[in-house]
Amino acid sequence: DSGVTQTPKHLITATGQRVTLRCSPRSGDLSVYWYQQSLDQGLQFLIQYYNGEERAKGNILERFSAQQFPDLHSELNLSSLELGDSALYFCASSPYPGGANTIYFGEGSWLTVV
Amino acid sequence: GQQLNQSPQSMFIQEGEDVSMNCTSSSIFNTWLWYKQEPGEGPVLLIALYKAGELTSNGRLTAQFGITRKDSFLNISASIPSDVGIYFCAGQLSGEGAGNMLTFGGGTRLMVKP
């Protein structure tokens, strides 16, 4: 158990819909990261937040957005869903921006768009 | 964007055999990491490498940070059935704007025959 909690674990939704994935970081961690894992693109970095502020942005679509709340949990919002958005979405957390060896991943949220 | 080429894509070996996998990049990274992912789980860090030329071991696992900072390899000695999983290399390029993002290789699926 990494200490990073993601909900829901599985989600099936229709094209055009909007979903929200939630992540609770490990206790004390200030940084939250979102990654997308798909068969064709592999593991791709989406976005990072540190103490409520966006710190780095990767290959995140404009239809996707994220935020980190004062209690440090984070949400990833996916809208106007397409079939190609079906993937495993991971949240990870770390105590501070640096130190790759302190990044811990959650178990992921499986999103299936039908 | 940056890409990590990981090979081989899959390996099917006999228990007790040694395994070697590697990653190459078109860009330099400050840190190289190796992760293992098992079904239903997020990636779990195995080894982190911080200096060019560094050779680090973790039990039966040995990894090296290439001198050019553009490659890394992972060796597993005397494989056992529980080594089954997908192994990912990842590079981190810290700095302003880069945050703490990880760039992942495509993964090596390891299967071990008892």
Image (cartoon, rainbow, N blue to C red):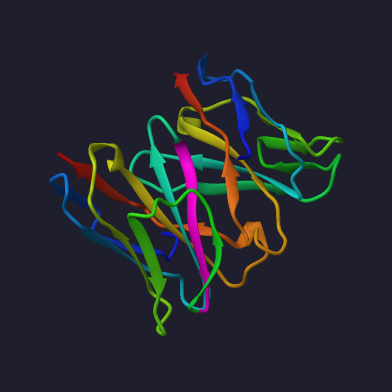
Q: Judge left or right: residue B75 versus residue B40.
A: right
Residue at the extreme front of the image, as rendered: A62
Residue A61: x and y, percent? 40, 50
Count of marks placed on residues: 0
Q: Residue A98: name its quadrant.
A: bottom right
Residue A46 position (above or below residue A86): below
Q: Is residue B29 left or right of residue A2?
A: right
Q: Nearer the viewer, residue A82 or A22?
A: A82
Please identify the quarter of the rendering in which residue B94 is found. bottom right
Vertical side of A7 occupied by A12: above or below = above
Residue A72 located within the stretch drawn in magenta: no
The magenta stretch spans which residues?
Answer: A42-51
Instruction: Say which quadrant the N terminus of chain B sits in.
Output: top right
Residue A46 magenta-highlighted: yes
Main SS of the magenta segment? Answer: strand
- From the viewer's perspective, is residue B71 above or below residue B54? above
Q: Position of residue B4 (x, y in %)?
A: 62, 33
From the viewer's side, name the closer residue of A39 and B32.
A39
Q: Residue at the location (65% across, 62% down)?
A: B97
Residue drawn at x 39%, y 79% as measured from the top left? A69
Instruction: Name the residue rendered at 44%, 34% in the picture.
Output: A41
Instruction: Give the camera-side residue of A19 and A33.
Output: A19
Residue B82: x and y, percent? Answer: 46, 33
Residue drawn 50% across and 32% down? B83
In the image: residue B34, left or right of residue A43 = right
